[in-house]
Amino acid sequence: MLILNKTVRVFSIPSKRKIYEFLGSFTFHPGKLFLHKLVLGIETSCDDTAAAVVDETGNVLGEAIHSQTEVHLKTGGIIPPVAQQLHRENIQRIVQEALSASRVSPSELSAIATTTKPGLALSLGVGLSFSLQLVDQLKKPFIPIHHMEAHALTIRLTNNVEFPFLVLLISGGHCLLALVRGVSDFLLLGKSLDIAPGDMLDKVARRLSLRKHPECSTMSGGKAIEHLAKQGNKLLFDLKPPMHRAKNCDFSFSGLQNVVDKIIKQKEKEEGIEVGQILSSAADIAAAVQHTTACHIAKRTHRAILFCQQRGLLAQTNAVLVASGGVASNLYIRKALEIVTNLTQCILLCPPPRLCTDNGVMIAWNGIERLRAGLGILHDTEGIRYEPKCPLGVDISKEVGEAAIKVP
Ligand code: KG4
Ligand code: ZN
């Protein structure tokens, strides 16, 4: 993946004339008075162009999204300049759609919040550039948003969750466990040392040619694995959970992917079929991979809860574990997490699926959280940059590993 480890200067995309035309396309709604703070959120960190208007009480007044998934599926992955071009082509329309749906005129906004870190440099640049021009024209405050912080706080829009709580983010691009202590106060307990679980499931599904499977042709890799796993026997292949000796909360999925690759090659030989044809044992392989992934994720999460409870960072009862991201929609993995939360007397919460994946609502909501807390609101955007790489909070994963907590 093309992510540069440096801060990069933004470059301008839509012309000033275009922004004026854009603003001119809105009409005021006389007689309508917004008493609450209103934030426009803009997200372009990866392959979704998304925007939303959210008010202080968590009402989503309008939202719009353009997903590039179809295009990237054809090329077998995200090509950053292609993603950048698609963001450029869609950002104005998407922001306009979100604002129009909300019936809020741009002048009524309290602030504009935009993802500035982490993510693909070329993608982040489009959102930031567009937002800065809008901020300049409207003379509104700007709130730079950390994409992972926004994912982590989304649950506070849908549920009444107080700080602190634990969050597990598992998707195609994310894999981390963090303790959320405040709007901008995070402790990173562990993360993937290589790829994210969704990335691994997507690669396994591609290797199994599940797109050609009649029941799975329209599903994402992870969803296809979940679907087929229901028909398979998880015990037919002996897959070891990754990192089972390391008593920390880090994750790893590339080793598992390599082992599964070897199994598939072997099976293709045994069944005498070519790469690209569907194995008769595809469902058993899917079941074994899903089971091993669930065990690995559940074990790391269990250790994170025990660590936080032992250190007094989380309550002994009724502490909240939030699971979010595309992979968290997997019901087998959720079941494994439920076993862990029952054992540790915690409560498992998951945002609704549309808020688990990348969206504009979570960015707008993070803007609201920051407005309410008075944190990171900029009235001068001079020198603002996007940051392709930016860790989440304070990394205490070494301390977690040193505690070497045994998980029953
Ligand atoms: O959060 P998301 O929509 O996008 C990003 O990664 O940013 O997550 C997509 C990932 C893909 O890798 C997809 O295969 C996986 O989530 N996924 C699933 C399921 N649905 C989507 N993985 C396991 N089980 C599912 N039901
Ligand atoms: Zn995300």
Image: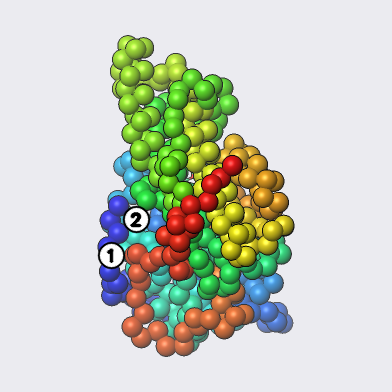
Which of the two residues, 60 or 326, is positioned nearer the viewer here?
A: 326
Q: Amino acid at mark 1?
A: Asn
**CA–CA distance in space, label 1 to label 2:** 19 Å
Residue that carries the numbered disc 2 in the rendered image: 83
Identified at 37% across, 51% down, the residue is: 193
Q: Residues within 10 Å of mark 2 (few under 14, many from 20)?
A: many
Q: Position of residue 41 (x, y in %)?
A: 52, 69
Q: Amino acid at mark 2?
A: Ala
Q: Position of residue 272 (x, y in %)?
A: 32, 11
Q: Residues within 10 Å of mark 1 (few under 14, many from 20)?
A: few
Which of the two residues, 349 or 18, is positioned nearer the viewer here?
A: 349
Q: Is residue 98 placed above or below 218 in the rendered structure?
A: below
The secondary element bearing badge 1 is classed as loop
Q: Is residue 136 placed above or below 336 in the rendered structure?
A: below
160 sits left or right of 40 in the view = right
Q: Position of residue 18 (x, y in %)?
A: 38, 74
Pointer 1 or 2: first along the chain: 1
Residue that carries the numbered disc 1 in the rendered image: 5
Identified at 49% across, 41% down, the residue is: 296
Instruction: Say if residue 352 shows up in the picture.
Output: no
Pointer 1 residue Cβ closer than 8 Å to ligand 2: no
Which of the two residues, 130 or 272, is positioned nearer the viewer here?
A: 272
389 sits left or right of 189 in the view = left
The secondary element bearing badge 2 is classed as helix
Identified at 56% across, 77% down, the residue is: 370
Identified at 40% across, 57% down, the residue is: 46
